[in-house]
Image (cartoon, rainbow, N blue to C red):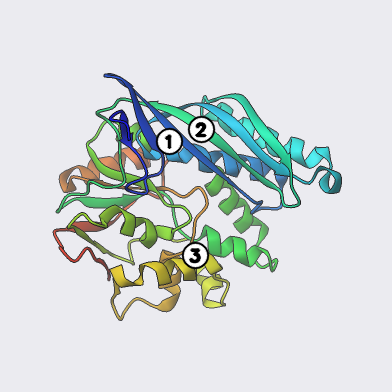
Amino acid sequence: MDPNVLVGLGTADDAGVYKITADLALIQTVDFFTPIVDDPFDFGRIAAANALSDVYAMGGTPKTALNLVAYPMEKMGKEILRAVLAGGIETMREAQTVLIGGHSIEDNEFKYGLSVTGFVHPSRIWANQGLRPGDSLLLTKPLGTGIINTAAKGKLPTADTIARVTALMASLNRTAAEVLQGFEVSACTDVTGFGLLGHLAEMIQSTGTGVTIDSRAVPVLPEALEFASMGFVPAGAHRNRRFREDMVRLSPEVSPVVRDVLFDPQTSGGLLFGCNEKDAPEISKRLLDTGVEDTVVIGRVSDDDGELIQVI
């Protein structure tokens, strides 16, 4: 234990935060995974954006990064790895984050990601808990990337769909985070492997609050609904549902397909955050005006002691 640890393991937050001075705290995070798209350059972009997102979700600014690589050099050769690292560097350059080193090992299964360090003011940290009754909940990217990536293994999505999903996953949450700096954010996370409802469960667990989600308002990639109805749902979505089913109450009008999308594990998903209800329209407008075009209010926080997610 250390009193300078401002955010640690206790609340399953996106990153750890350590206080350095009265005006400066250090954000630390790490993330890496196996390829989810065929193009190596795009995989590098996506993996870097995904790791950097944790810093943005804490209200911070990423500053430095270290590459993490596990790679079968003899089987795959140098060129693929060069392309992946180049993609990562392009995203880090866009984020104005400096690559200062890294580590690589030989492995039969390729994995790539980053360890990222960022800065934040100790009094301006966005933790994933802190939602207040009456708060609006907003989401900045549509759901469905996990389902579409699963369908891509069967060569079902069109080239346009693959390009749209790739661009979505490779896009930084930087602009959204910068806009939100001008408002009071009660809690924030990014939607990744646990799906929308899994991350919402983390936000309300042991807080004495609940949330109501309007499933019709949640932004979803249209192709995701199509492929989910065909059964192309990643195993992670089913694990997410089983793990959090005690906290979720679905209206009879919510179809199993929509339910699967709400639990779909995302890669480099959008920011999910709470704010005062009166600020929600202005925040939405600012985000839309700056190009975060999928931003929408998806629900509201209640003082539900049962800590339930009601999906209507």
Residue 209 is left or right of residue 84, and the answer is: left
Question: On the image, which quarter does residue 231 sit in?
Answer: bottom right
Residue ID for mark 2: 116
Q: Is residue 234 above or below residue 269?
A: below
Q: Position of residue 216 (x, y in %)?
A: 33, 66
- Identify the secondary structure beneath mark 3: helix
Residue ID for mark 3: 222
Task: Tell me which amino acid carries mark 2.
Answer: Val
Q: Position of residue 197 (x, y in %)?
A: 36, 62
User: Which sits in the foreground, 77 or 20?
Assistant: 20
Task: Please report whichever mark, 3 or 1, sits nearer to the chain's N-terminal start.
Answer: 1
Cα separation between marks 1 and 2: 8 Å
Q: Residue at x 54, y 48 (%)?
A: 169
Residue ID for mark 1: 55
Q: Quick one: which residue is furthest to the bottom in this view? A: 252
- Identify the secondary structure beneath mark 2: strand
Task: Tell me which amino acid carries mark 3.
Answer: Pro
Q: Position of residue 122 (x, y in %)?
A: 28, 27
